[in-house]
Amino acid sequence: MPCHLISANGVYVFDDIFSEPIVKNYLKENTKIEILSFLEQNHLDVDYYIVLGFEEDFHMIYKLRESYDTYFLNFVKGRELFKPTYPQKNLLDFVKSPISHIGIVGRYDKLKYLADIFKNLKHNVNVILYYAADNKDYGFLEILDIESSKEKALSKLLRIKMISPENLLAIGDNFNDIGMFKLAQISVAVANAPDEVKRFAKFVTHATNNQGAVAEAFERFILGQK
């Protein structure tokens, strides 16, 4: 059975899980310079990082600081288990490298304030803010190329494979899934999704994303239709 893949919030589209991406939407160099210079110069007391592209094995490089928020350190430890993850003093040294996104991890209220600032900078970017799945006091803010989003990547994949949105089932748990909900014929939010996200879905599962929500949606909308 073919398995297409969209990853990194729509930066990549893979024809299958073993091949190189057929779509890559990296941040443009002038955008990288603007965002990273802003973070460097304004001393915002936030933990931030970049993720290098497919060509450089998705290395995550985070800003070297004297101290870090405990939540960020746990995030780093988790990522170290499967991909190279390490600190560097000046992330601007990497602007010539392909970068999928610039990320900030921290208190949700502070990230919400920063998201509004980034949306008004000179270069158009897609700013995605969503709650941490395990702690709603924290969140993740990702800054991507304007062409990178789950719904845009999904639309490209549908065109390439000549699939109609009427045959699309979208399952999501956070704000970055709302665009897919608007595109799909059937949209499903999991039980532990934020209420603001559930309002955009046609159905809500009884199970959370850690308790079999995807299986529940498949049983209802795919297996149940046979």
Image (cartoon, grey):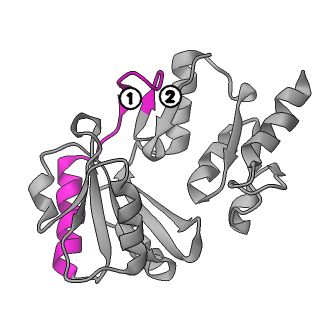
Vertical comparison of 37 with 152: above or below? below
Vertical comparison of 127 with 38: above or below? above
Residue 105: horizontal and vertical position, in percent? 40, 70
The structure residue drawn at horizontal position 43% and vertical position 65%, both measured from the top left corner, is 141
Residues in magenta, as a range: 13-42
Quarter of the figure with residue 196: bottom right
Please tell me how crowded label 1 is: few (under 14), some (14-19), or many (20+) other residues with Cα within 10 Å.
Answer: some
> Which element is circle 1 on?
strand
Task: Check disc 1 and report the residue beneath it.
Answer: 23
Image quarter where the N terminus lies is: top right
Residue 172: horizontal and vertical position, in percent? 66, 50
Residue 120: horizontal and vertical position, in percent? 36, 67
Whether residue 176 sits left or right of residue 67 in the image: it is right
Whether residue 171 sits left or right of residue 53 in the image: it is right
Quarter of the figure with residue 55: top left
Q: Earlier in the sequence, mark 1 or mark 2?
A: 1
Task: Check disc 2 and report the residue beneath it.
Answer: 156
The amino acid type of the residue labelled 1 equals Val
Residue 82: horizontal and vertical position, in percent? 37, 47
Image quarter where the C terminus lies is: top right
